[in-house]
């Protein structure tokens, strides 16, 4: 099974170079980023919901998907397309009971055991990393590397998106190791020219396979 998208932008308002996060996200989705994960820890619930509602309008207008990190209540309140669950969050099976069948559930994983658990729990896709060294993932330990990515993609049936140090220049490597796509933060969020960075990543993905995922994919269609 292929993922509902092959490029997954994770937000970080601390890396926008002083720009407003909604403005950065707007530029990214208008340049072709198909999915965004709102991941802004430290915000109070009311402020997070306000930001989520703003991003929901931006992504909907651009035809992109919006997932909310961890907070099922915020995802439901803003009408997001799904949630992204951390390892210490609510298990995907329980999340499904609350969200219903039509929203996507992604899970962050860092090992084969975690990937298998996410698959058994009913996740739609997983994000695995960090693959390469990156400051935003230091708390998750050393890079897992391409070999771990290859092992996971061979042994789980879920779509696996690689995260951690992903740039246009290494997209071909991670897809060659079996990843169905990539998730990233700084390569777009911190870019001086956000549209150019987004287009470069789209081009790298397209060049690495002949059939990049588009709006017609069944998982996109079911929630679109």
Image: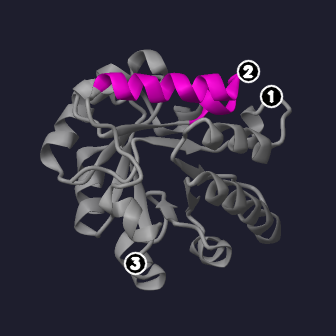
Count residues near mark 3 (Cα–Cα under 10 Å), then give few for <14, some for 14-19, many for 20+: some
Find residue 196 and report its image quarter: top right
Q: Position of residue 38 (x, y in %)?
A: 63, 54
Q: Do the numbered discs 1 and 2 sit on residues whose CB atoms are within 8 Å?
A: yes
Disc 1: which residue: 17
Looking at the image, residue 206 sits to the left or right of residue 183; the answer is left
At numbered mark 2, what does the secondary structure look like: helix, strand or loop? loop
In the image, residue 128 above or below residue 204: below
Count residues near mark 1 (Cα–Cα under 10 Å), then give few for <14, some for 14-19, many for 20+: few
Judged by its main secondary structure, the magenta piece is helix
Q: Residue at x 62, y 43 (%)?
A: 29
Of the residues tagged 3 and 2, which is closer to the observer? 2
Disc 2: which residue: 192
Residue toward you, 195 or 43? 195
In the image, residue 54 above or below residue 173: below
Q: Position of residue 197 (x, y in %)?
A: 60, 24
Distance between the Cα atoms at labels 1 and 2?
A: 8 Å
Disc 3: which residue: 96
Disc with the residue nearer the chain's start (1 vs 3): 1
Distance between the Cα atoms at labels 1 and 3?
A: 36 Å
**Stretch in magenta:** 185-208
> Visible in this render: residue 192?
yes
């Amino acid at each position: 099974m292929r993922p509902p998208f092959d490029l997954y932008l994770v937000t970080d308002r601390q890396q926008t170079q002083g720009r407003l996060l909604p403005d950065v996200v707007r530029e990214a989705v208008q340049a072709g980023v198909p999915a965004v994960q709102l991941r802004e820890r430290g915000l109070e619930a009311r402020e997070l919901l306000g930001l989520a509602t703003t991003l929901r309008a931006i992504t909907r207008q651009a035809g992109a998907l919006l997932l909310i990190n961890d907070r099922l209540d915020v995802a439901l309140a803003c009408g997001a397309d799904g949630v992204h669950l951390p390892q210490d969050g609510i298990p995907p099976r329980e999340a499904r009971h609350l969200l219903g069948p039509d929203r996507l559930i992604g899970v962050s994983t860092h090992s084969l055991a975690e990937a298998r658990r996410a698959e058994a729990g009913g996740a739609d896709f997983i994000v695995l990393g960090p693959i390469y060294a990156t400051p935003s993932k230091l708390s998750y330990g050393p890079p897992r590397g391409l070999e771990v990515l290859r092992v996971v993609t061979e042994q789980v049936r879920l779509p696996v998106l690689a995260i951690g140090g992903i740039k246009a220049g290494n997209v071909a490597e991670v897809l060659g190791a079996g990843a169905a796509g990539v998730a990233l933060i700084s390569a777009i969020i911190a870019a001086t020219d956000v549209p150019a960075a987004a287009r470069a990543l789209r081009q790298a993905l397209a060049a690495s396979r002949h059939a990049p995922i588009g709006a017609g994919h069944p998982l996109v269609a079911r929630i679109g």
